[in-house]
Image (spheres, grey):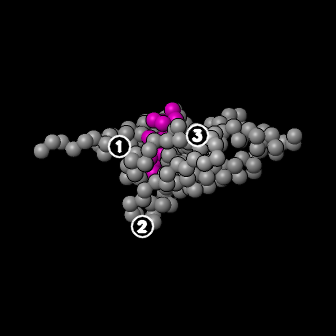
Amino acid sequence: MDEHDLLAERFETHRARLRAIAYQTLGSASDADDAVQEAWLRLSRTGPGTIDNLGGWLTTVVARVCLNMLQSHREQPLGMHLPEPVVTSTDGIDPEHEALLADSIGPALLVILQTLAPAERLAFVLHDMFAVPFGDIAAIVGRSPAAARQLASRGRRRSRAWLRPPAPI
């Protein structure tokens, strides 16, 4: 097995988690696949010898790609966009789809997440759903750890406000 094959094998051990992060952040399976593919391309250009923590590095790359995609989508005209459903294979259990389904936050929350600013959305998803520390999130969004904590808190508050049932009349 050559170095490229070994790198591909190591990448594959992280693929399901990276795809889940990207899907939950972007709400689109095809965009999630694009983000994961971009992470692979960057990894293959970088090489494994320069990376101490492959999982952390890949999470950072996917998160930044998602943030860029969210920001570019924000510049386009907005309409209400329902997230794509998670599709499972009909001929058996696909482990990648199974992991994505297990980690899925549901279409309703994805619709709510679309109302958040890109940095809020990313901080909320990374911290509250994947337990990424605020220091790591701060490096991804280019803010201080305190600001990253505030972004996640704001996203959490706004999500709860949307999920709260209306007051009785």
Residue at label 2?
Answer: 77
**Where does the C terminus fall, quadrant-wise?**
top left
Q: Residue furthest bottom?
A: 77
- The x and y percentages for residue 19 are 59, 45
Amino acid on which the number 1 mark rests in the picture:
Ser
In primary-sequence order, the first of circles 1 and 3 is: 3
So how many labels did they put on this image?
3
Q: Specify start and end residues of the magenta stretch as a single range.
A: 118-131
Residue 160 belongs to magenta span: no
- The x and y percentages for residue 143 are 48, 43
Q: How far apart are marks 1 and 3 (CA)?
A: 25 Å
In primary-sequence order, the first of circles 2 and 1 is: 2
Crowding at mark 2 (Cα within 10 Å: few <14, some 14-19, many 20+): few
Marker disc for residue 98: 3
Crowding at mark 1 (Cα within 10 Å: few <14, some 14-19, many 20+): many
- The x and y percentages for residue 142 are 51, 45
Crowding at mark 3 (Cα within 10 Å: few <14, some 14-19, many 20+): some
Residue at label 1?
Answer: 159
Image point 38% across, 60% down: which residue? 80
Residue 8: image quadrant is top right
